[in-house]
Image: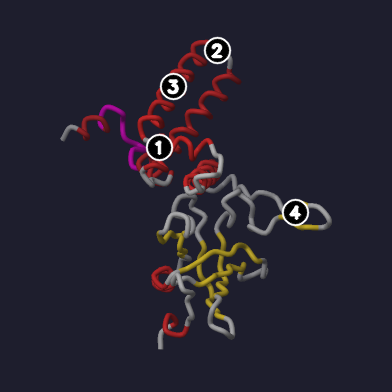
């Protein structure tokens, strides 16, 4: 009998999955899986989940590089909850925290734990873009009555998103001409943000851009542009 046959999925075909550091026992996150995510997790040895907001399967670390390597899979006595012991590469939480459970209630909210940034990691400088992309995708799914600048951009459509990118690119050029370094930083951050909104519109995680840049690494600009015309 396969693992899938022994699990009890809810009426939506989902089961909660808790991930835990295999060495320290620290609880890192909780998310949902469908049968396909469970099967892919077993097949690849890397944890896959199901996003209820985006209604699709995803692999942890596909955009951030923060993969979860499976060490052991357990399920509870009622067969309706999974416990997955893993090796966490980088941060488990999309905020950059090691664990999603980094806040404690002690009469008021207290934050414990610090954001994990491994300077030696290939993805160390990409964490914030991946985290921001994930937040953008979450805000995209907000209900009609919930206020969000990101949601308003998606609601207004592609032309509005593209218009904002054009506007921000112009402001970057103006800041660059002005010579104020802090202003350049501010305007480039605005441009990056709106480019991430465009990536979200097409469901393109930042990793797709990183992969393209890696492909070009070591190529001359002349050769790379010439290859596009062939």
Q: Mark 4 vs mark 2: give the one in front.
A: 4
- Element at badge 1? helix
Query: Where does the N terminus fall, quadrant-wise?
Result: bottom left
* Residues shaded magenta: 214-223
Query: Where does the C terminus fall, quadrant-wise?
Result: top left
Quarter of the view holding residue 148: top right
The residue nearer to you, when weighing 96 against 79, is: 79
Disc 4: which residue? 112
For marks 1 and 3, give the CA distance. 14 Å
Which residue is most to the front? 145
Disc 1: which residue? 198
Residue shown at 41% from the left, 34% from the top? 156
Query: Crowdedness of circle 1 by 10 Å Cα count: few (<14), some, many (20+)?
Result: many
Q: Mark 1 vs mark 4: give the one in front.
A: 1
Q: Mark 2 vs mark 3: give the one in front.
A: 3
Disc 1 to disc 3: CB gap under 8 Å: no
Label of residue 18 in the image: none
């Amino acid at each position: 009998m396969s693992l899938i046959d022994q699990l009890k999925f809810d009426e939506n075909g989902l089961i909660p999955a808790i991930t835990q550091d295999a060495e320290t026992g620290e609880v890192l996150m909780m998310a949902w899986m469908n049968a396909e995510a469970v099967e892919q997790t077993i097949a690849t040895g890397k944890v896959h989940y199901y996003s209820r907001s985006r209604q699709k399967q995803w692999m942890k670390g596909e955009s951030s590089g923060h993969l979860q390597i499976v060490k052991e899979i357990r399920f509870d006595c009622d067969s309706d909850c999974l416990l997955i012991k893993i090796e966490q590469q980088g941060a488990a939480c999309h905020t950059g925290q090691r664990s999603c459970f980094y806040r404690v209630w002690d009469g008021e909210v207290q934050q414990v734990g610090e954001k994990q940034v491994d300077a030696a990691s290939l993805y160390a400088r990409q964490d914030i873009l991946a985290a921001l992309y994930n937040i953008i995708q979450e805000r995209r799914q907000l209900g009609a009555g919930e206020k969000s600048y990101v949601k308003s951009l998606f609601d207004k459509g592609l032309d509005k998103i593209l218009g904002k990118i054009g506007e921000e690119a112009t402001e970057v050029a103006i800041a660059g001409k002005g010579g104020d370094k802090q202003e350049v930083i501010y305007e480039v951050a605005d441009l990056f943000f709106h480019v991430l909104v465009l990536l979200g519109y097409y469901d393109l995680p930042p990793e797709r851009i990183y992969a393209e840049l890696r492909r070009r690494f070591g190529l001359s600009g002349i050769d790379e542009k010439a290859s596009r015309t062939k």
